Amino acid sequence: MAEFVLHPQLQADTLVLGDLPLSRVLLARDSRYPWLILVPKRNGIREIHWLTAAEQGQLIKESSAIGGLMEQYLTPDKINVAALGNVVPQLHLHHVARFRSDAAWPGPVWGQHPALPYTDAELAQTAGRWQSWLAALADFRLG
């Protein structure tokens, strides 16, 4: 199997936190929202239904685990999960913890406001916090 390659746009817009059995876990570099992205480590996959049935089940398991962590640690008003892929064709699943007080509420986060980058210190702190929360998942491996 060929080595997994992350799409260049995802590489530019995120920080790798680590890996789950199927997916790479990414932190979006937009400090406006708690935002993780799962990318199944399968080259050439654009749609969920292109994964095998077992991989589809694993993706749902991993997505549910991310949602559970967001709910447990952030207590959001809603968790938005989406696989758009209109700009980045590589299959990736966004998980955004939403709050009535956030900049885009109640609308979608896409296209509402330009990304607000983390400072280096904020990025390191946020990544470390997510990695410690993700470590509760037995099969998580640091990036």
Image (spheres, helix red, strand yellow):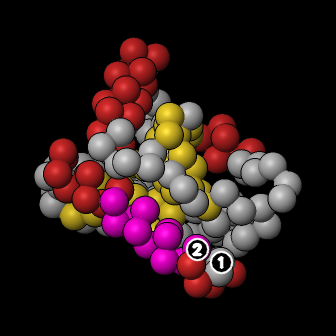
Q: Confirm whether residue 105 shows in the render.
A: no
Q: Secondary structure at mark 2?
A: helix
Mark 1 and mark 2 residues within 8 Å of each other at the beta carbon: yes
Relative to 33, say whether 59 is above or below.
below
Q: Give the residue type that dot 1 points to.
A: Leu
Q: Quadrant of residue 89?
A: bottom right
Relative to 12, say whether 92 is above or below.
below
Relative to 93, say whether 51 is above or below.
below
Residue at figure coordinates x 64%, y 66% from the top left? 91
Q: Give the residue type that dot 2 points to.
A: Glu
Q: Which residue is mark 2?
A: 55
Between the residue at mark 1 and the residue at mark 2, the CA separation in whole angstroms equals: 6 Å
**Looking at the picture, how far across and down is residue 92, in whole percent?**
58, 62
Name the outermost residue toward the right. Answer: 2
User: Is 140 on the left-hand or right-hand side of 88?
Assistant: left
What crowding class fits label 2: few (fewer than 14 Cα within 10 Å), some (14-19), or many (20 or more)?
some
Residue at figure coordinates x 51%, y 52% from the top left? 20
Q: Confirm whether residue 141 shows in the render.
A: yes
Q: Which residues are magenta?
A: 55-65
Q: Quadrant of residue 31?
A: top left
Q: Which residue is mark 1?
A: 51
